[in-house]
Amino acid sequence: MPLVPTRELVSKAAAAGRAVAAFNVITLEHAEAITAGAAAAGAPGVILQISENAVRFHGGRVEPIARAAAEVGKACDVD
């Protein structure tokens, strides 16, 4: 699925009377598990977020984990 802006994702879910869960991604495996779980649950979408602690875990570099999470998001079956 294409990446969707948070505002659009939340607006669609709210209109359908649903919620959108947001989960912290620390490693690539977390992003894969989160998106697989969201797809299995039939969620309208999921937010992959990266905390400051996760950035510290990756040596202060957000770009590698952000790019990885974005690629996982593009490949999953939910917004």
Image (cartoon, rainbow, N blue to C red):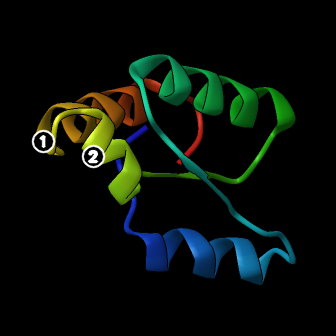
How far apart in space, not on screen, are marks 2 and 1 (Cα)? 6 Å
Q: In the rendering, at what x and y percent does residue 29 appear?
A: 50, 17
**Given the image, on which type of amino acid does mark 1 rest?**
Arg
Dot 1 falls on a residue whose secondary structure is loop
Give the residue type that dot 2 points to.
Val
Q: Do residues under tags 2 and 1 come within 8 Å of each other at their CB atoms?
A: yes
User: Residue at 49% of width from left, 29% of height from top?
Assistant: 31
Which residue was labeled with disc 2?
A: 55
Q: Secondary structure at mark 2?
A: helix
* Residue 2 can be seen in this image: yes
The residue that label 1 is drawn on is: 61
**Residue at the spot 35% in from the left edge and 34% down from the top edge:** 69
Which residue lies at the image location 17% right of the left edge and 35% below the top edge? 59
**Which quarter of the figure has residue 10?**
bottom right
User: Percent from the top left, x then y, of residue 67?
Assistant: 20, 35
* Percent coordinates x, y for residue 63 in the rendering: 12, 41
Pinpoint residue 52: horizontal percent, then vertical percent: 34, 58
